[in-house]
Amino acid sequence: MYTLGEQADRGLRDILLHAARETEHYRDIYSSHKRLVDNLKLSDFPLLTRQAVQRERSHFLCGRYQRYPDIEYVLMKRSFGFSGIPLEIYWDSRDDSRSQACLWEYRKKRFGITQDQKCCVFRTAEYAGNKIMDDMPKRLSADGKTMSFSIRNLSPDRLQWCMDAILKFAPAWMCLSPSIALMLAENMAANRQTPWSGLRYIELCGEMLDTQTETIIQDTFQVQTANVYATQAMGAIAASCEYGHLHIFPENVAVEAIRNGKPVMDEEGDLYITSLQNNAMPLIRMETEDRGILQTAPCPCGQPAPVLRLSQGRNLGFITTKSGRKVSAHVLRSMAEYTNEEISRCMAHIRFRQNDNGHMDAVLGVKPAFYGWEKETARIFKERIEDSELRQMQWNFTFANSCESDGTKMGVHPFFESWEGEEQ
């Protein structure tokens, strides 16, 4: 484990003690523990799976956030990422703001971006408090600073409509997944559009970022970019420096690379993360299903924050339609998220595979309380398809036990993959 620094070390000790004393899940583990709870170390905590969080969500919620007055500050975030395993994560809204502070400081220091400047984002779904909002093609925030677009439909006509709206809004920066940014860049090139003069920065997050994709985005938009590694469950984890290296935010998280059950440095391992900020629902050593290397060598940029080199991560890739058009697989996440909310969050997992350009196979598992709802869930999902070319594909749903899919444990396979091994 790398050195966090005095303040972050204190934050880690505090969150471990808080979790062991205040949450049912960790109290049950350490009620008969040989060590004094006050002396617990990170390595004393077991590795945590997404399935365990999904199955026992309320057991991770700190007791005081289940009653007044702290219940007034509870914010629920949905996580429906690379694994296809949807989670509901509780945050104290004040902790959530603190977890974002380091990212805003980073944006201001490197790119001069502040919360007062206009931004465009593409979202799989939007929420008002803890309830999903009706899907809208675009939405302007109450303060007029953020314009968000739905990912549900990314047809060529819709992309052009989005670009026209973005050009008119003229944001100073955008927060996009690499696949969405690449689709916008290709649309701009095809329509011979040029970026607006006020654009200063594009933040790329939510997927693995390769050099070729980043170069295309930079050249098309004529703007600086950065790679940000973040999750709904953990908040901001790391951000890239001028050398392209991801530096961990030690005040926010503790990151471990686990190999053969043990933390390693300078070796590839499965990444597990502990949030130092989430007091409402402390998640200790939670799996990400990403892989990477924690680097001990200093970075040329001079930052003391440790470097994280991602070797395998969230790479949703592209669906290929019959015409050969590529569509970001984020549309599948959006449709799945709206479907899950409509049917009382019944999904345990959902996973997609494309065999050829005309077919899409999906493996769907529902939670035990919803056994028998599989076909209805698949029907509602297919009703959410808006892109005409995606509707023309043949969608084949198979149903699996909530603990297994195709005989393998959930999360082993990515949310979307191509059977033909196409470049993702």
Image: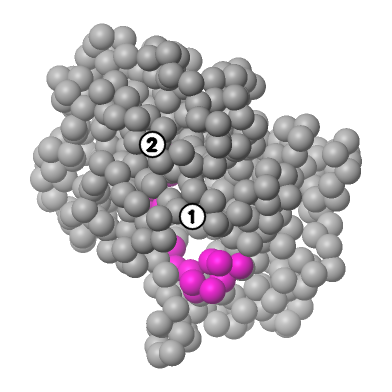
Q: Is residue 63 above or below residue 185?
A: below
Asked if the magenta segment contains residue 134, the reply would be no
Q: How is the image coloured?
A: one colour
> In screen coordinates, is 256 left or right of 159?
right
For the point 85% across and 50% down, the residue is 304
- Give the amino acid at mark 2: Lys
Residue beneath the point at 42% across and 23% down: 183
Q: Earlier in the sequence, mark 1 or mark 2?
A: 2
Q: Residue 293 at x, y = what percent? A: 73, 38
Of residues 322 and 411, the one drawn nearer to the viewer in this rendering: 322
- Find residue 225 and report its image quarter: top right
Residue 107 image position (x, y, % from top left): 65, 49
Q: Regarding mark 1 in the picture, which secondary structure is present there?
A: loop
Is residue 16 placed above or below 221 in the rendered structure?
below
Q: Which residue is mark 1?
A: 232
Q: Position of residue 393 (x, y in %)?
A: 18, 20
Q: Which residue is mark 2?
A: 168
Of residues 403 and 265, the one nearer the viewer is 265
Residue 320 falls in image quadrant? top left
**Magenta highlight range:** 79-98
Label 2: few (<14), some or many (≥20) within 10 Å? few
- Position in image of residue 365 (x %, y %): 26, 45
Identify whether 250 is placed above or below 32: above
- 201 up-or-down from 100: above or below: above
